[in-house]
Image (cartoon, rainbow, N blue to C red):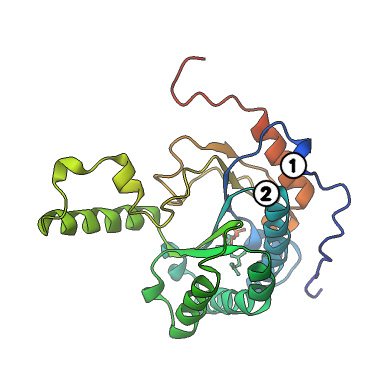
Amino acid sequence: MGLIRRKVHTNHGAKKPEDFVKLPNHVAIIMDGNGRWAKKHRLNVAMGHRQGVETLREIIRHTDDLGIKSLSIYAFSTENWNRSPEEVGALMQLILDFFASEIDELDEKNVRILILGDKNGLPDKQRDALMEAERRTGDNTGLNLNIAVNYGGRAELTRAARELAAEAAAGKIAPDDIDEKMLADHLYTRGQGDVDLMIRTSGEMRLSNFLLYQCAYAEFLFPTVLWPDFRVSDYDDALTAYGGRERRFGKRL
Ligand code: FPP
């Protein structure tokens, strides 16, 4: 079986913003289950990831259609380097292909792309493509599309601590000036606010070092469907479930 290129914008029955009681401002997604999907279909793992990109295109489009402000997706973690060279190579190629094929449409739709993670640790081609996507869409004011590549939540916090320490050592700030706002302003997601809804597909219930600080009060949903099988209707179900959650932020309501 080859790649199932799904036709987008034939999402009959996809919900509209007015169909929800409340929508999150910031959704984060761990796109899990590509490997299991490939195995189930007797394909190599690279095909699972390729099919996962098809799902991703639809989900980005629907997020934008719904007017959600930020979408953060986990494309490649600092731990993913430990996978086989073939799989790492396939993921790196998919990242290149994704930007080559999607950048025009994303830019046209006013989407602002931001890469979360250490771009310097990437091969030159990937680093250049990601930097170019950020540069080209940097002034856009629509959906914030945050793509985590070579990202780890602890590494992000460590980097913020290092920057703050350097500013303190240079006398620009006093250690006592450091508060939660200042720390948040040193994260990749600065200015975008916390994650409201975290979705991890495939039934795994872990955060895997994704957006540790930003998820402090996130609502979590763990649909069992594998990422390549995750449809706009599954996404709408998750967003509807989010709308039914009572968020207390530690208070007694
Ligand atoms: C988890 O599935 C998924 C990943 C490690 C990578 C996700 C990446 C993509 C969907 C494509 C690349 C992204 C862009 C922006 C083009 P898994 O392989 O861990 O699944 P398994 O647990 O079933 O093995």
Of 86 and 184, the residue lying toward us = 184
- How many marks do you count on the picture? 2
* Quarter where residue 36 is shown: bottom right
* Quarter where residue 3 is shown: bottom right
The Cα–Cα distance between marks 1 and 2, rounded to whole angstroms, is: 7 Å
What quarter of the picture does the N terminus occupy?
Answer: bottom right
Q: Kindly identify the amino acid type of the residue bearing the numbered disc 2.
A: Gly
Left or right: residue 14 versus residue 157 is right
Left or right: residue 155 versus residue 142 is left
Of the four image quadrants, the one with ligand 1 is: bottom right
Q: Residue 240 location in percent, x, y?
A: 72, 35
Residue behind mark 2: 67
Q: Residue 189 location in percent, x, y?
A: 44, 54
Residue behind mark 1: 17
Tell me which residue sits at (26%, 40%) in the image: 179
Tell me which residue sits at (29%, 55%) in the image: 160
Earlier along the polypeptide chain: callout 1 or callout 2? 1
Left or right: residue 37 versus residue 14 is left
Q: Is residue 92 visible?
A: yes
Of 42 and 83, the residue lying toward us = 83
Tell me which residue sits at (42%, 51%) in the image: 209
Q: Residues within 10 Å of mark 2 (few under 14, many from 20)?
A: some
Query: Are the residues at dot 1 and dot 2 in contact (C-beta closer than 8 Å)?
Result: yes
Does 96 sit above or below residue 112? Answer: below
Does 44 sit above or below residue 141? Answer: below
Q: Residue 129 location in percent, x, y?
A: 52, 79
Q: Kindly identify the amino acid type of the residue bearing the numbered disc 1.
A: Pro
